[in-house]
Image (spheres, grey):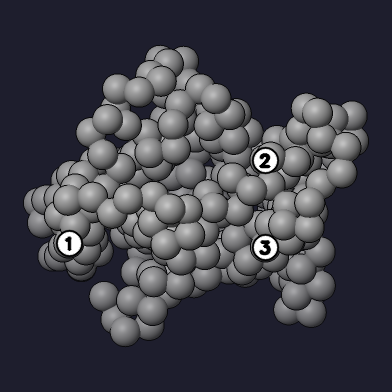
Amino acid sequence: MSRKGFLLFLACGIVWGIPYFFIKIAVQDFSVPTIIFVRTAIGALVLVPIALRRKAFLPALKKWKTVLAFATFEMIGPWWLINSSENGHINSGLAGLLVATVPFFAMAIGYFYLGDKTAAHPKNVMGLVFGFAGIILLVGIDALTQNLEVVWVGAMILAALGYAVAPAIASKTAPNVEMVGILSLSMAFSALVYAVPAALNPLAPGVTMPTVESWVSLAILGAVCSALAFVLFFALIREVSYSRSTLITYANTAVAILIGVAFGSEPFTVGMAVGLPLVAVGSYFASRQHN
């Protein structure tokens, strides 16, 4: 991995590792549809002007089928599945573990759909396995047994599959369209889908006035964890390839857990001490280009 790729990898790991912290704050005052609507609406407000200035909006509009597919598999479906699953059905540790299956789906999609035969190189597979073992240690074995509901575990796996499918579709069907155009339209479409549910049910049960912290969390989720995060992610795809870029789900989980330790008074366990190096080593081997 190049120096640029490494820096993009770290940046993506951070901006997609912090949403769990801010969602935990926002969900106390806002409904799931409202959180998704605000995230995508802010993301669209940030990205549409950029897409227009770069003359990427109309080319993306011509690829409307790609836009609809990307929005459905990356935002509309997964964000509802993840937020709903964590809303009292499964714990956040298990949620992070299940989302970390994205690289395995991406490896298969990259190999069979995108024709990237290096994705299944033994060293890449070894890296994926090592990294996933590290994730299990990070979240803790107890995450596999607490509040286990099969339907919602399946929902999380379906969300992970969506995360793997969406960028592959965009890379395959619109390779010459600047991604800021597809992202801006996807967020605008997702915001339209959630506008009515958010209007009908804007706040969490029993809440009459959201806190300043919740409003700030929504703003960060939209501008940083959505708009900026996707721009960085597709820059990473161009730098290291599609299948390797999805390894950021390992980094995301590690960042989310470290934030919980630093700001959420969560304990730093032996499993974390062992798991973090495994995640780093696994990501290193899985992200390298092997011939």
Q: In which quadrant of the rendered image does the N terminus lie?
A: bottom left
- Asked if residue 3 is positioned above or below residue 140 in the image, the reply reads below
Contact flag, marks 1 and 2 (Cβ < 8 Å): no
- Work out whether residue 20 or residue 108 is closer to the camera in this orientation and state it: 20
Q: Which residue is mark 2?
A: 27
Horizontally, residue 52 falls left or right of residue 241, namely: right
Residue at the spot 39% in from the left edge and 71% down from the top edge: 10
Q: Secondary structure at mark 1?
A: helix
What residue is shown at x 64% (from left), y 48% (from top)? 25
Q: Determine whether, in the image, residue 16 is placed left or right of residue 120.
A: right
User: In this figure, which residue is indicated by the disc labeled 1?
Assistant: 277
Residue type, numbered disc 3? Ile
Q: Nearer the viewer, residue 194 or 145?
A: 145
Q: Position of residue 254 (x, y in %)?
A: 34, 56
Inspect this view and state whether residue 140 appears: yes
- Mark pair 2, 3: CA separation: 14 Å
Label for residue 220? 3
Quarter occupied by residue 65:
top right
On the image, the x and y values in percent for residue 37 come to 77, 45
Query: Which residue is farthest top?
Result: 150
Q: Nearer the viewer, mark 1 or mark 2?
A: 2
- Pick the front one: 128 or 265: 265
